[in-house]
Amino acid sequence: MVSSSSLSLLALLVSLSANILAAPHPSSPVSLSMNLKRRAPEARSADDINAWAHAHKLNVEAKYGNAHKTGKRSSGQNLIVNQKADSSFFGSVAVGTPPVAYDVILDTGSADLWLASSTCTDSACDGIPTFKSSSSSSFQNKSTEFSITYGSGAAAGSLGEDVVQMAGFSVSNQVFGVCDQVSDGLLNSPVSGLLGLAFQTIASSGASPLWETLASSGAWDQPLMAFQLTRFNNDSQVQELEPGGTFTMGATNTSLYTGDIDYNDIPDNEESYWLQTVSSITSQGNAITISSGSSALAAIDTGTTLIGGPADAVAEIYANIPDAEAGTGQLDGYYIYPCSTNVNVTMAFGGKSWAISNADFQAEQLNENTCMGAFFSLSTGDNAPAWIVGDTFLKNVYSVFRYNPASVGFATLSSESLAMNGVSAAVPSATIGSVATVSATASAGARDANNGAASMLSLGPTLSLLVFSMTMLLLRLV
Ligand SMILES: *[C@@H]1O[C@H](CO)[C@@H](O)[C@H](O)[C@H]1NC(C)=O
Ligand SMILES: *[C@@H]1O[C@H](CO)[C@@H](O)[C@H](O)[C@H]1NC(C)=O
Ligand SMILES: *[C@@H]1O[C@H](CO)[C@@H](O)[C@H](O)[C@H]1NC(C)=O
Ligand SMILES: *[C@@H]1O[C@H](CO)[C@@H](O)[C@H](O)[C@H]1NC(C)=O
């Protein structure tokens, strides 16, 4: 968290550079990287935090409320960006012919890809790279309406189909939403949209998600994708954008974790969200009562900042923390506690138990002595999991999302991974290229995908703090 005198850490975008350069490895697997971006810091008031916390809870609840053959198998890596002190994590996809790179939230809690359209005249689209379908010779309009509703607004447009590349892979006919209506504050520059990484069964578009097309077609060395997410929320010098860690498609990166990956199957083969069953939670060394059945189901969600769970269990977590109190007003559902308390919460999903660092538990500092914890009470709809396990947890583990057998795995972060936490880095160049194409119409082998369409944006100073993690706002209209 921040120092007691300065409440905050949130920051603003100053500039972004997203040059793309192809760097195909001479032999597979191909390793690719993209730009990391930095922003200047900005203070955030307690009121802002309260308002944000309130919106976060409502929005997570809203979110959960109510091919072709490939050539050779491969794997690839996309370096990601940590936005606003761990609020969200985004990567880059390249879309169209010639390919243009867009920053997209990497969201294992949803299954649609969508981008803001160049025809969007809403203020929400000001200053962000938008997709111009007429600039892509391979774009095909599906002339089907698409909409996603958020806790505080909506994005709508039409479905299209185009070449989409990421981490060295290419899908020639990826269906995605091109949104010309975007509510204020839904996109947090430089992010242009969202890449859903959950299963097709929950896609609003009905389309196969990029990752699932690649995994099911055998494009990957291994049918899995993995994340290492950085922590900056206890860094008082945090910038708006910091290095976010790594997203690997088709393999795990053994330099980023140690020991075995502890996999647990998705219960009952319900491939929708990346579901797990919460088997144990401890707080300050004491076991919390976990109900069985549906109230133990959890979605492992890179697109949610904090951790939401059933009210009873969350209350029990805080009952072990001296002087913790339920929040009121906009902090309803959250808890506050003395910042001086070192909190140790662990979670298990059938296998090993994983500790959440005090730095992550301490989600916000409200004033000199009072902090807000990362667990909040959540009421999801009947068809949604009771727990939403977001980045608060995921920053503490190497996480693996395995297509077959459908499961989620966690492993201990390596010292190399841990060494990236809180370490600002220069903005590297984005890298993209196609290695394993998924369609007969896409080019074979590696090719350059040099473009600068998304580079050098200069952005205005104000972004809504209420929406500093846009994926928290996603509500699916299934
Ligand atoms: C593993 O991750 C590290 C750190 O991001 C990177 O330098 C390395 O190239 C990656 N290895 C592979 C095989 O992708
Ligand atoms: C697709 O076609 C529809 C009309 O069917 C039009 O309204 C929409 O703007 C088009 N979308 C794009 C991205 O060109
Ligand atoms: C956190 O709690 C767990 C479970 O009681 C315990 O095994 C672990 O040693 C504790 N970690 C720290 C750093 O206190
Ligand atoms: C942030 O938290 C981590 C994990 O608890 C710790 O290792 C690191 O030293 C902390 N950084 C700062 C700047 O306090």
Image (cartoon, helix red, strand yellow):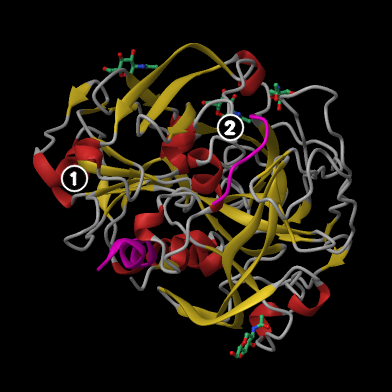
Q: Residues within 10 Å of mark 1 (few under 14, many from 20)?
A: many
User: 435 or 263: which is nearer to us?
Assistant: 435
The residue at 49%/78% (across/down) is 146
The amino acid type found where label 1 is placed reads: Ala
SS at mark 2 in the image: loop
The correct choice, above or below, for 90 with respect to 153 in the image is: above
Q: Earlier in the sequence, mark 1 or mark 2?
A: 2
User: How much space separates mark 1 and mark 2, taking CA atoms?
Assistant: 43 Å
Tell me where residue 42 appears, x and y as whole percent: 70, 58
The residue at 44%/77% (across/down) is 152
Q: Are marks 1 and 2 in contact (CB under 8 Å)?
A: no
Provide the residue designation for mark 1: 315
SS at mark 1 in the image: helix
Q: Residues within 10 Å of mark 2 (few under 14, many from 20)?
A: many
Considering every residue shown, the one lying at the far top of the view is: 259
The amino acid type found where label 2 is placed reads: Trp
Provide the residue designation for mark 2: 220
The correct choice, above or below, for 267 with respect to 212 in the image is: above
Q: Quadrant of ligand 1?
A: top right
Q: Which residues are magenta?
A: 57-73
User: 465 or 292: which is nearer to us?
Assistant: 292
* Mark 2 vs ligand 1: CB below 8 Å: no
Q: Is residue 237 left or right of residue 350?
A: right
Q: What count of labels does the image hold?
A: 2
The correct choice, above or below, for 259 with respect to 464 in the image is: above
Residue 360 appears in the rendering: yes
Q: Quadrant of residue 316?
A: top left
The residue at 41%/55% (across/down) is 200
User: 28 or 361: which is nearer to us?
Assistant: 28
